[in-house]
Amino acid sequence: MIRRLPLGPGSQLPGWLEALEAEAFGASWGPLTDQETLWAEEGKAFARWSFVPATGEAELLRIAVAPSARRRGLARGLLQAGEAGLAATGIQWLRLEVRSSNAAARVLYEAEGWTLEGTRLRYYRDGEDAALYVKWVGTESQ
Ligand SMILES: CC(C)(COP(=O)(O)OP(=O)(O)OC[C@H]1O[C@@H](n2cnc3c(N)ncnc32)[C@H](O)[C@@H]1OP(=O)(O)O)[C@@H](O)C(=O)NCCC(=O)NCCS
C-alpha cells in the first residue's frame, strides 16, 4: 500500500529507505527537512518531495523502486499519490530534474503527463545535462 510516511522534520528514515536511497543514488540525504515529505510502499519504493506552500510549488527530489519490484507500476502509483496529496494542500506546480540519459524515468514522467520545459547544460558533476520537467496540478485551467 502506497502511503505518505508520517515523518516529521529531523526524524530518522526507516532503514530500508535509507538503504534504497543509497543504492539508487550513491548516498542517502538522511532525515527530512521541514519542507520535505515522503510517499512510500513499505520496503520497496519511495518518492521524496520538497514543497513551498507560499509559492504553490513542489519538486520531486528523488524517486526509486527496488530493482526486484520494478515494472509493476509502483513508481507510477507513487507519482499519482504524491501529486494528489500535494495538490490537496494547495500545491499547483510540480517540478523535477532528471539526468538526460535516464530513459526509464523520462518515459515514466512523460507517460504521467509531465512536460519537458528545458535543459540545464552540464548540471551534474560528471558533466551530464539535466532535463527539466513541470506538471500543473492546480484546479484552475492553465
Ligand atoms: C525510474 C524508476 C523509478 C521506475 O520505477 P518502476 O516502478 O519500475 O516504474 P513503473 O512500473 O511505475 O513504470 C511506469 C511506466 O514508466 C515507464 N518505464 C518504467 N521503467 C522503464 C524502463 N526501464 N524502460 C522503459 N520504460 C520504463 C513505462 O512506460 C512504464 O509503464 P509500463 O510498465 O506499463 O510500460 C525505477 O527504474 C528506478 O528506481 N530507477 C532508479 C532510480 C531513478 O533513476 N530514479 C529517477 C530519477 S530521481
Image: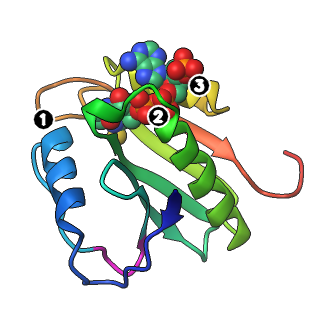
Q: Which residue is mark 3?
A: 110
Q: Quadrant of ligand 1?
A: top left
Instruction: Find out whether residue 1 is within the magenta segment.
Output: no
Q: Main secondary structure of the magenta part?
A: loop
What number is the disc on residue 82? none
Type of amino acid under label 3: Glu
Q: Secondary structure beneath disc 3? A: helix
136 or 120, which lies in front? Answer: 136
Q: Is residue 22 above or below residue 10?
A: above
Between the C-alphas of marks 3 and 1, the distance is: 25 Å
Residue ranking furthest to the right: 141
Q: Quadrant of residue 66?
A: top left
Q: Which residue is mark 2?
A: 132
Q: Please name the residue shown 62% across and 33% down the image.
A: 114
Q: Nearer the viewer, mark 3 or mark 2?
A: 3
Q: Is residue 77 left or right of residue 22?
A: right
Between the C-alphas of marks 3 and 2, the distance is: 12 Å
Q: Please name the residue shown 42% across and 58% down the image.
A: 40
Q: Which residue is mark 1?
A: 125
Q: Where residue 56 appears, x then y in whole percent?
A: 64, 66
